[in-house]
Amino acid sequence: MNGEPPPIEVNSTVSQSSSPDRAARVASSVAESVRYQGRKTSRQGSEQRRQAILDAAMRIIVRDGVRAVRHRAVAAEAGVPLSATTYYFKDINDLITDTFAQFVERSAADMAKFWGSTEGLLQEKVGQMDGSPESRRRLADDIAVLAVAYVRQQLLSRRDQLLADRAFQQEALLNPRLHELLRAHRRILLQGVNHFFEVLGSRQPEQDAKVLTAIIEEMEYQGLIDGVDHLDNVDMLAILKRYMYLVLGL
């Protein structure tokens, strides 16, 4: 139709500085930039106890919410003396901030692994393109199917991490100390998706990455609310196909 933009061209090659490599570098950079507020440790045993306290705080956040994080509750959850939590973290704000700092650090490592594991699949899908509308449609359909599978897998195997992410976002609204951590976390999530759209030839890869990420996050949220068994897979697939058709000019 007149006035419609021409179909985008899908890049047929993925450079050595591809999405997994770049995403891994960004994730590593973010992980290295994370700064903890609590008392630093120099001995292995002390660090293990500090890690146990942070892990216990995260379990409480996932199970009962951020407001349930208290020194006494965390000490009981971690199986350590109350004096240990107050030794490493002078106040609850430091404990909460460091708990989310560790969450960001671990998320960086997880995302680096994820994009590393998808490199071969991305190269294969892009390599099958011949520029025709039919090949673009097949690619869009494949991406939509993979995205639905990704959402379901997140809900099945990483439900606690998704709950922690939501708690992190909510707490950042109330705690300015978490703002930079949250920005770093968002950079990790968006980097790989952004370059994925660059490979597809998107004219606006950053915007496309943000939209797709928002769609997937909304689906994950619905899955947390309703349960993975109650997800409307047909509707999810239709939404993702429609979006990918728009991106690929179909």
Image: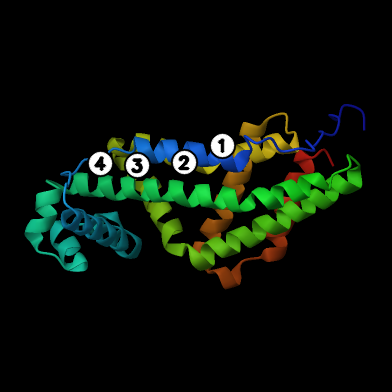
Between marks 3 and 4, how big is the CA–CA gap? 16 Å
Residue shown at the point (51%, 47%) measured from the top left: 112
Residue 228 image point, x, y percent? 56, 69
Q: Which residue is mark 2?
A: 27
Q: Secondary structure at mark 4?
A: loop
Please report contact status of discs 1 and 4: CB closer than 8 Å, yes or no. no
Ranked by sequence position, the earlier of labels 3 and 4 is 4
Q: In what element is the residue under mark 3?
A: helix
Describe residue 247's horizontal placement relative to residue 195 as left or right.
Answer: right
What residue would you read off at disc 1?
A: 22
Of tags 1 and 4, the one toward the viewer is 1
Density class for disc 3 (Cα within 10 Å; few <14, some 14-19, many ≥20) is some
Label located before the other in sequence (2 or 3): 2
Answer with left or right where residue 240 lies relative to residue 23: right
Checking the image for residue 36, the label placed there is 4
- Residue at horizontal 52 percent and vertical 68 percent from the top: 156
Residue type at the position of mark 1? Arg
Location of mark 3 (residue): 172
What's the distance in space between the residues labelled 2 and 1, CA to CA?
8 Å
